Amino acid sequence: KKDPNVIGIMAIENTIAGSLLQNYELLKEYKLPIAGEFKLRISHCLAALPGQTIHHIKEIQSHPIALMQCNDFLYTLPGVKIVEHEDTALAARDIAVKNLVGNAAICSTRAAEIYGLEILATKIETNKRNFTRFLIFGNQWMVDEILKDEVINKASIVFTLPHTEGSLSKVLSVFSFYGINLTKIQSLPIIGREWEYQFYVDFDFADHERYKQSLIAIKPLINELRTLGEYPEGQTPKE
């Protein structure tokens, strides 16, 4: 049954932590087309049950990436136990639901508000130029509806190459010839085929027809090609 209200959003890379490799595999495995991208400024806070101060905190929990992004702040809290959690918002929820006195979560201010936690410190991330890029995806009919009035100027593809010398450079030369601007390239091993890789590529373009021609031109040079999505480029938000 088609539900027009259901779409998905998934983080794909962070300007500090880099690519989320497991999510690239999910894109390929579930074959849901990309409808767009969203770039979010990431700012973390420290939140705990109401009535506590930072001096009451004995344990801090959050997603490993969030913990890494707040290293400098955590170094100012010697003796506090650091615990990895599957998600920043779920860490905040656990503290609220389980009434974990002496525990704090590194999460967004919105998560702290939703779960009724008190914010003990804000903007605790080490690098203030911290952005995460999210992909928006859904079933093909839903993606077609989202994109029907949009200007398409970005695409994501995945391809495999023959295990021969210079195979990748030849493909990249074709993209350069057609004026296609590569914004990201990510290689992942092909399971069961030692030393062979699949390449995830993002690029933007001004001429949609030239982009289509470039895909035709690389086909003799590659083994497999799949277009993950064609969509409008997302803008990086101002601080």
Image: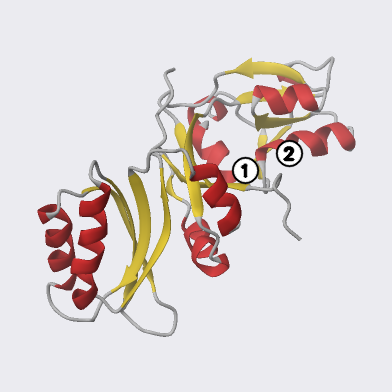
Based on the displayed image, in which of its 4 quarters is residue 167 positioned? bottom left
Q: Residues within 10 Å of mark 1 (few under 14, many from 20)?
A: some
Residue 226 in the image: x percent, y percent? 39, 68
Image quarter hosting the C terminus: top left
* Amino acid at dot 1: His
Q: Residue tagged by mark 2?
A: 91
**In this picture, is 227 found above or below 138?**
below
* Amino acid at dot 2: Ala
**In this picture, is 148 found above or below 42?**
below
Question: SS class of the residue under badge 1?
Answer: loop
User: Which residue sits at x=73%, y=39%?
Assistant: 91
Q: Residue tagged by mark 1?
A: 63
Pointer 2 with pointer 1, Cβ within 8 A: yes
Based on the displayed image, in which of its 4 quarters is residue 93 positioned? top right
User: Which residue sits at x=19%, y=77%?
Assistant: 220
**In this picture, is 70 found above or below 203?**
above
Q: Is residue 156 visible?
A: yes
Give the side of residue 171 with respect to residue 191, left or right. Answer: left
Image quarter hosting the N terminus: bottom right
Give the side of residue 188 with respect to residue 103, left or right. Answer: left
Q: Earlier in the sequence, mark 2 or mark 1?
A: 1
**Circle count:** 2
